[in-house]
Image (cartoon, grey):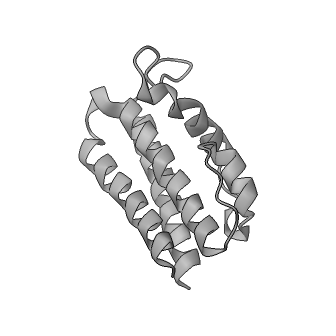
Amino acid sequence: MKNITAEWLKAANDDLLLIEKILTEASLTHMVAFHAQQVIEKCLKAISEEKQIELLKIHNLKTLFAKINEPSFININSDMVNLLDSLYIESRYPGDRGLLPDGKPSLADAQEFYEFAKHIYNKTFKILTT
């Protein structure tokens, strides 16, 4: 594995560790959404680096999944990808602060975001280490 690939994976894992620390804080569910999106983005960029696919300087997960065209991700939850994409920018700034159509993500939503990000991280790790 290339050094840069390993750095992307480490950065993704750091985001997972942060999520684990804040996952039970109801006031931080929007930040769980942000960091879950970041885990997935960094995983996809790790694959891009390892497979020498042009690294896009974008944050849109749907576009990144399409760019890497990895068979292991064919059946991913596209609704979750779209949801995390929609929450990404808003979670970083005051105002809407990463709100779902019905308001701030719940603790259950945050748990789902975390589980999905962890699933993508584990798949990515397997792709890159086998």
Q: Quadrant of residue 66?
A: bottom right
Q: Residue 107: in sight, yes or no? A: no
Any part of residue 51 in sight: yes
Residue at the spot x=53%, y=53% of the render? 40
Q: Is residue 120 above or below residue 105?
A: below
Q: Quadrant of the C terminus?
A: bottom right
Furthest residue toward bottom: 130
Q: Residue at x 57, y 60 (%)?
A: 45
- State whether residue 36 is above or below residue 94: below
Give the number of marks: 0
Compared across the picture, whether 95 is left or right of 130 comes to left
Left or right of 100, for residue 7? left
Q: Position of residue 59 (x, y in %)?
A: 59, 43
Place of residue 33 in the rendered image (x, y in percent of width and height, measured from the top left):
45, 38
Q: Nearer the viewer, residue 103 or 39?
A: 39
At 42% from the left and 48% from the top, the residue drawn is 114
- Location of residue 105 in the rendering, given as x and y in whole percent from the top left corner: 44, 28
